[in-house]
Amino acid sequence: MFAVLALLTLIVGVITFFIIRHLVRPLKTSADQIASMLVSEEKIYPIPVIRRDEVGVLVSALNQLIEKQEIQASQLEVEKIKAEAASQAKSDFLANMSHEIRTPLNAIIGLSELQTSADLPPEFSQRNEQIIRSSHLLLGIVNDLLDFSKIESGKMQMHRQPFAIDQIVDQLKILFSNQAISKGVELRFLLDEKLPQCLIGDNLRLTQILINLVSNALKFTEKGFVELSIQIMKPYSSEDTGVKLHFRVRDTGIGIDKEHQKLLFASFSQADSSITRRHGGTGLGLAISKRLVELLGGDGISLESEPNVGSVFEFDLAFATCSEDEADSIRTVQLTGLNHRSTKEWRSFCGQHVLVVEDHPINQQMVKAQLERMGLKVSLADNGVQGVERVKAESFDLVLMDIQMPVMDGYRATEAIREFNTEIPIIALTAAALVEDKRKALDVGMNDHLGKPFSTEELYQQLVSWLETRPIASGTEKNATATESSLDTLDATLQPVESPFPVTMPVQKHKILIVDDMPANIKNIGEFAKG
């Protein structure tokens, strides 16, 4: 019996030794090699196959799996690089297209605004107003495309800063009051009485969301009202460090049926294709607004709507509340803004000398006319090199600097000027209108940034921060003469081109039916057909 037990023990020991030596130890060695490769940043190499038994087969299969994963990882990396390059190419294309559109658009808006102050017959004044409105619509489309591109590429950044919700509401009133009155639609604003005076968040993106929603509501509402409500979602006291707000935009417009509601927040989509022809738009506004709400920490925008009854768009956002110092700074800014509007709105500059560095001839003359109307002396430079040389040779009070120019761009020109003159204010006056462009302009030494296209009022407000003003009555005649001279130069630049087609008078008049949903197009085609 003892001999049998001893024999069994010996057999178990031999088997155990065999398993440990031929199976467990090789498996542990392979496992240690895999573990070392996982913690290493170097490339993963195949595990050496030193056996031809089951362990060797297992290690060989594992090597094949590793090789396959390496190939897939390489393919994914290549595709990632291609996707990033395509995304960057798209962003670059949109940025360049934005610049190419904004530059002539700036001339169109600026020249049209210059004409509004002229004594035009009512018919021509109305046409001029239509040009300005159409230009701003085109600008809105360009801005939508740029915002959408930035969101899609993940480059849209949120900037937290103190702001007053009242200022946003005031801006909405200014933007949409006239439109609401002209349509006979009541515009309502309902604000919670306990709203904090100062919040911390991205006020520009919040304003953009509310502008999109209110604009959309007004666009599709022909009677009744459009209402913006901002309410606190839970009891709030001055000791709280944050607050959650509920935003709601309600209208009595055309409404949307259930089938089309799911398409409403999709990019480049509208509830009904006929809406695009009737009301215009890119179909991006609501998609952008929804993504912005999500970037600000919200859960998107909810919608309740019924055809021929109206729609309700709602979203919630949380904000931090301001400290006492931050609240005081906001109140100071509000008071400064009121004083600024009341004391500087109808004032002229004091004949200061401004250099405009701009390569586009029409924009040169347009800006020159705007500045001379404000009481300024203006000199022109066609590129950065000329701009630097003129600042060296002459005395200027301010420089308006374009960015994209031949020979030397605005960035390099500013850096060159700062080497010998660190005091003169330099303002970027450019179609590169992204937030990143503004930061780059400030980094190279510019003092501020004004994106094209800009209105005469926006240009004026930019300049009053750097140049002294005086009552406008003291220089009215001089400014008018300067402006007429500048406009004469501009007219000379825009010489009419003789038509290559012979003009013949018809012997018999014919009737033409014009079918178009745009009144302005019907009027223009009709007048052209009349000859």
Image (cartoon, rainbow, N blue to C red):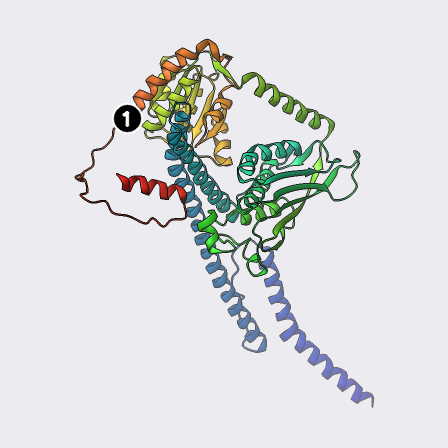
Residue 228 vs 266, above or below: the answer is: above
- Is residue 445 visible to us here? no
Residue marked by disc 1: 493
Residue located 46% across and 11% down the image = 350
Q: In the displayed structure, does residue 254 sit left or right of residue 126?
A: right
Which residue appears at 51% of the width and 69% of the height?
Answer: 64
Q: Nearer the viewer, residue 404 or 43?
A: 404
Q: Secondary structure at mark 1?
A: helix
Q: Residue furthest right?
A: 1
- On the image, the x and y values in percent for residue 409 come to 38, 29
Q: Quadrant of residue 486?
A: top left
Q: Position of residue 78 (x, y in %)?
A: 45, 56
Residue 85, x across and y down, in percent: 43, 49
The front one of 188 and 123 is: 123
Outermost residue, bottom side: 1
Vertical order, 479 against 366 (above or below): above
Residue at (36, 50) in percent of width and height: 515
Please say if 353 is above or below 509.
Answer: above
| Screen quadrant of the C terminus | top left
Q: Give the amino acid at mark 1.
A: Thr
